[in-house]
Image (cartoon, rainbow, N blue to C red):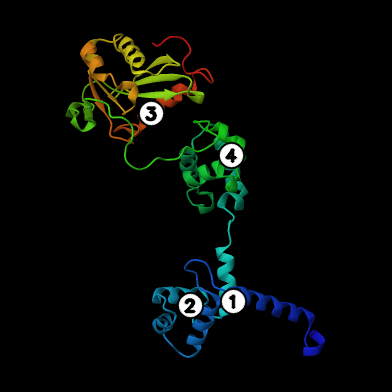
Amino acid sequence: MAAAIGCSPRSVHALCQQARLAERSLAGEPGLRLSFAEREQISRGIAAGQSARAIARSLERAPSTVSREIAAGGGRRRYRALRAHRRARERAARPKPTKLWRCPRLRREVEAGLRKRWSPQQISARLRADHPTDPEMRISHETIYQSLYVQSRGELRRQLTRNLRSARTKRRPRRGGPETRGQIQGMVPISERPPEIEDRAVPGHWEGDLLVGARGRSFIATLVERQTRYVMLARLGGERRTEHVIEALKRRTRELPAHLVLSLTWDQGKELASHQRFSVQTGVSVYFCDPHSPGCSQPGRTRPDRRRAERAPAGDLGLGHAG
């Protein structure tokens, strides 16, 4: 064929590739992408001196779509339909190489941070502090999480997920939508706490939470004093029924003078469903966080809890009796 038309075999091969690309493209593109036929019409409209708005009207497309297409293709003087279509297909190819894959130096820094049991948030902040003028050494904590948990983005060795503080090998989905759990009777919302609690003006106001061990078989109740950040733990063993939790909290709070245990703020977990009985027996007012607001009004509250839980015996948060 090359000899018949008087050109080299390489030129014939290139022309055949372009023809196959055009044939596939004429069938249309999925979704809202421009097809090759539309790009060819844009090219002809430019040659005829039409404005982007006039070309868009003939294609029944938005003018901004045509303007962006012409700009991405090199402008009105350099726009060519086939070249623009080929570049668009290359840009749309998935999966794309991620930043961790493209930058081995960044990947090594992230892996080193995970081995030190730093959280992805801490790694991201540390990199910004250590490399303030190097944009290649910036990465968001969400990108690190995706590299660990999403199989298609497994640039980091998956065994490093065991170095995360949660030690999860799968990411827990964030639940949305309305609250479907049974409501706790007689809840007093966090918005009704007295001002002295919000201001941390006096000690004696506590925030509590329930930590769950491996496979949900053991539990620890945590108590953090808002002003001093003093922490108490109540081991619950493998039992999280409200009666058991209430008794454990009563034993811990009775270890302190009454003026140092004035209120307790908890999330809406059912383990404190008997809060009214707890208040009557101890004189401690109980307030509840808003739904889906872990950490109540103080995001840092759970951090010392988690660090102390990490030092508990591996695989069991409930050795011994509560208290």
Residue that mark 4 sits on: 111
The answer to whether mark 3 and mark 4 are in CB contact below 8 A is no
Residue that mark 3 sits on: 302
Furthest-right residue in view?
A: 3
Q: Give the CA distance from mark 3 to mark 1.
A: 55 Å
Residue that mark 2 sits on: 70
Whichever of callouts 3 and 1 sits on the residue coming sooner in the sequence is 1
Whichever of callouts 1 and 2 sits on the residue coming sooner in the sequence is 2
Residue 226 rendering spot, x and y as whole percentages: 29, 25
Residue 213 rendering spot, x and y as whole percentages: 48, 23
Whichever of callouts 4 and 1 sits on the residue coming sooner in the sequence is 1
- Mark 3 or 1, closer to the camera: 1
Crowd band around label 2 with a 10 angstrom C-alpha radius: few (<14), some (14–19), many (20+)? many
Residue type highlighted by circle 1: Arg
Residue type highlighted by circle 2: Ile
Q: Give the CA distance from mark 4 to mark 1.
A: 40 Å
Q: Secondary structure at mark 3?
A: helix
Image quarter where the N terminus lies is bottom right
Whichever of callouts 2 and 4 sits on the residue coming sooner in the sequence is 2
